[in-house]
Amino acid sequence: MSKPGSRPYLFTRTIDSFLTGLSDAFAFTVRFFKEAFLPPFHVREIINQSFEIGLKSLSLITVTGFIIGLVFTKQSRPSLEDFGATSWLPSLIGIAIIRALGPLVTALICAGKVGSSIGAEIGSMKVTEQIEAMEVSAINPFKYLVTTRVLATTLTIPILSLYCVCVGLYGSYINVHFEEATGIISFYQNAFSSVSFLDIYTSVIKSVVFGFTIGVVGCYKGYNATQGTRGVGMAANKAVIVSMFLIFLEEMVIVQVMNWFRHF
Amino acid sequence: MIKEGSHQINREESVISITGLEKSFDELEVLKGVDFTLYRGENVAVLGKSGTGKSVLIKIIVGLLKPDAGEVLVLGRQVDKLKGRELDALRLRVGFSFQSSALYDSMDVYQNLAFPLTMNKKNLTKAEVDHEVKEALDAVGLASKINEMPSDLSGGQRKRIGIARTLILKPEIILYDEPTSGLDPVTSGEINDLIREVQERYNTSSVVITHDLTCAKHTGDRVAMLLEGRFSKVGSFESVFASEDEQIKSFYNYNFTT
């Protein structure tokens, strides 16, 4: 119940503001779909942004993917040795990296690196009136800034995720090779022997959803930045936190849905 | 047609006509019934203290904000009724020079000027774009800065590039938001001269939002004093400041005696 004389709230101030934010974010996402299918398409800007996103994250994904593959193999080996099943190591790693680790690690890295950068860049343009400058020059800023970036993250993150899977498997191969002198072809054959088409399909779907989420959240937070430079920092920060939270939520839902398909 | 200096004002043709304009933000009433007319070829300086709604007024004129009540006609079109392509078409005829210059900081000076041009006139060749950019930069006397980044420019240079970016679309009306704020007196004087040169060279009509009386005196054919959400006095600089109104007198005294 609101105090007499104060602004009336439907529930409480916090709940009302959460619901308003949710409805704004929904409207923002709906607007993206409306704008994405109408010309002009700004293809060059989408390519530029994709290149930028790929370049920004490539080194970090290479190092992280390689280390995850290597360390995960090292950690899994003792448990499998106890059951005399070390020959299953490539299959285990293949399933783990393709199904879960590759897309998830890539998405988390990109949420930190790309999501924050999109939030800060658009936020800074918002508070310095650059977005209004586009509007008064008869340029649609939503289409030029938001649509291009969301499409770029949606298209690029699955590619980065695929790259992360390759690097992760290579890291795992290095460990297996030095421990068991296994050849690379034999390793990859084993690694993919237990991976189904549905696993790869799920992995790609997840990456597309994660990429879309990172783009939309980063752009939404930046586009709605207020309070000057402080607002820019907050937009970048919130872009990372909200993206990461949604990525874990989506991972859970997609895995559950795909498991239903697996049982059919 | 009245000839003032080397520019002509057509007092029979209004390019902006505002009647009964009201605008509030939550409980804060900013504009409380503004009536205003800008004639073709004329510069009007809008004066007022900070927070009186001067910038809100020009943001409504260009369709960045919607009025709560009243009618805003720009080049014969009711701005708040326009959407999409119709609004864009009008915006191409109305330039807006921002207080902060609002240059795109990821683009150099050339790209800042070429961007609105290439986005709106798709059939231009590279040579034509280069020519237009050079012409706009020559008009503001900064052709040598074509490859600089906005962060490498001084405040005055940024304002000039902002004006050049406005000019590149050849607007009929230019709205200047605090063109001299944050600048030293010499640079402010140069910007004032530039606003007059633009009016004479391109035959534009302008609204100059300012709280700088020197700027208003130099750039305005008329001066409009915005007090408490309404224009309390409109006319020549001398007639407005001959007023006995205490608020106008204190505004004048603060600017010229401190």
Image (tube, helix red, strand yellow):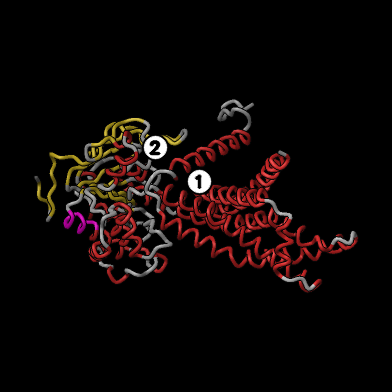
Q: Amino acid at mark 2?
A: Val
Callout 2–callout 1 Cβ contact below 8 Å = no
Q: Quadrant of the N terminus of chain A?
A: top right
State the quadrant of the C terminus of chain A: top right
Disc 1 marks a residue whose amino acid type is: Asn
Horizontal side, residue A226 vs residue A161: left or right = left
Most foreground residue, A137 or B100? A137
Place of residue A189 in the rendered image (x, y in percent of width and height, measured from the top left): 71, 62
Query: Residue B121 in the image: x percent, y percent?
Result: 27, 53
Residue A115 x, y percent position in the rendering? 57, 54
Q: Nearer the viewer, residue A148 or A196?
A: A196
Q: Residue at x 43, y 43 (%)?
A: A37
Q: Which residue is mark 1?
A: A224
Marking on residue B30: 2
Q: Are marks 2 and 1 on the same chain?
A: no
Of helix, strand and loop, which mostly describes the magenta segment? helix
Give percent across and percent down for residue B200: 16, 56
The subunit letter for the residue under badge 2 reads B
Tell me if I can see residue B246 in this picture: no
Disc 2 and disc 1: Cα gap in Å? Answer: 23 Å
* Residue range corresponding to the magenta coloring: B195-202
